[in-house]
């Protein structure tokens, strides 16, 4: 295994580099008969696309998706689906001057240590550009989930140390930060502008809500639902932590406080985040992820070059101030891929009953 594929029955493999000719994805195991079009996938890619607002990377990519295989007359055939998104707005010149140094916070040093070679142009395979392939695959996963009346939404609950005071899901589409609190969204925007003016970046916390998930998804021991969700989300470059339900607050509770009481009508609260024993319980699945600041900052930094000599440098090029909100859509995609994979695994199990 080379670490470029994810999933068991719904298996996704991404390929491509930030400044290569194209990005792409192959999905193996998608059920036949799912109605899907390039336009539907394009809508998801548009949500993630850079260059739409002045606080994100000015790189202008159309992110036009082409379905190469696995779809006939608007429906999936059950054979591998291959999609390509060509890179069009590439400028590698800012990286020529730093190709022999290891940028702090990036994967330059570790990729060199692992492979003995690396694509220094925009981070190559380690670039956030890779996530466009995940979103394309997630669009198909979401279409499958929509047929099962399962909905996934990711929203911003903290950014640059500013936290939401309330969660109103109707507010998410009303601001570009996808914040469920209108007043807090304005404060977050001001914080981003303040940090950008200083040449720095910031991080935050994204919450992902899965509504409509049936009970029974997840496998015992190693393939617990939260284990696979955690792996999927942690595979996104900027994410450094994942928690479910009450998360780390559970460590400060008593057992009588942390347990979710059950009534004939269902669970009376949801500190478990919709998962018990690694298996979904039918409640909303609630996940939060910690997103680190983007490491490409304009301030002078200290590092070493490939000869292990100390150097000081400044990064040039086109970069976001914060991975939020573009990363929100990547989170939705990865969660959708996991849920579909476990739906298929559960269907295979129930076939033996």
Image (spheres, grey):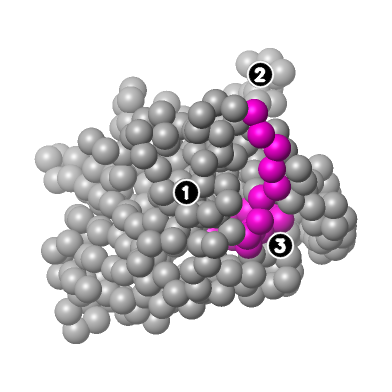
Judging by the rendered image, the residue that carries numbered circle 2 is: 251
**Element under disc 2:** helix
Q: Compare residues 323 and 44 and report the one nearer the observer.
A: 323
- First reached walking from the N terminus: tag 1 or tag 2: 1
Question: Residue pushed farthest bottom?
Answer: 73
Per the rendered image, the range of residues in magenta is 310-329
Q: Quadrant of the C terminus?
A: top left
Q: CA distance from mark 1 to mark 2?
A: 42 Å
Which label number is shown at residue 177?
3
- First reached walking from the N terminus: tag 1 or tag 3: 1
Residue depicted at x 31% and y 45%: 4
Taking 295 as reference, is 163 left or right?
A: right
Q: Main secondary structure of the magenta part?
A: loop
Q: For marks 1 and 3, give the one nearer the viewer.
A: 1
Q: Is residue 188 above or below residue 35?
A: above
- First reached walking from the N terminus: tag 2 or tag 3: 3
């Amino acid at each position: 295994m080379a670490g470029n594929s994810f999933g068991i029955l719904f298996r996704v493999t991404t390929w491509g580099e930030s400044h290569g000719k194209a990005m792409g994805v192959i999905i193996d195991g998608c059920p036949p008969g799912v109605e899907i079009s390039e336009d539907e996938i394009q809508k998801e890619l548009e949500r993630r696309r850079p260059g739409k607002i002045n606080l994100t990377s000015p790189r202008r990519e159309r992110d036009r998706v082409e379905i190469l295989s696995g779809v006939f007359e608007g429906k999936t055939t059950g054979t591998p689906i291959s999609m390509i998104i060509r890179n069009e707005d590439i400028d590698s010149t800012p990286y020529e001057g730093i190709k022999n140094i290891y940028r702090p916070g990036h994967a330059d040093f570790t990729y060199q240590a692992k492979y003995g070679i690396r694509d220094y142009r925009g981070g190559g395979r380690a670039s956030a550009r890779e996530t466009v392939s995940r979103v394309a695959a997630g669009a198909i996963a979401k279409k499958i989930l929509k047929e099962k009346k399962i909905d996934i939404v990711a929203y911003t609950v903290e950014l640059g140390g500013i936290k939401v005071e309330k969660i109103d899901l109707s507010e998410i589409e009303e601001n570009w930060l996808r914040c469920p609190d209108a007043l807090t969204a304005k404060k977050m925007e001001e914080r981003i502008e303040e940090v950008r003016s200083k040449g720095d970046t910031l991080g935050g916390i994204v919450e992902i809500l899965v509504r409509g998930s049936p009970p029974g998804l997840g496998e015992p021991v190693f393939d617990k639902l939260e284990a696979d969700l955690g792996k999927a989300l942690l595979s996104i470059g900027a994410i450094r932590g994942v928690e479910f339900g009450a998360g780390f607050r559970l460590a400060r509770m008593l057992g009588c406080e942390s347990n979710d009481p059950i009534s004939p009508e269902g669970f009376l609260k949801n500190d478990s985040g919709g998962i018990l024993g690694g298996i979904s319980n039918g409640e909303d699945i609630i996940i939060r992820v910690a997103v680190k600041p983007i490491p490409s900052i304009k301030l002078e930094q200290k590092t070493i070059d490939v000869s292990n000599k100390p150097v000081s440098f400044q990064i040039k090029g086109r970069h976001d101030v914060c991975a939020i909100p573009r990363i929100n859509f990547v989170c939705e995609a990865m969660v959708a891929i996991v849920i579909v994979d476990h739906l298929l695994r559960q269907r295979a199990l129930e076939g033996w009953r």
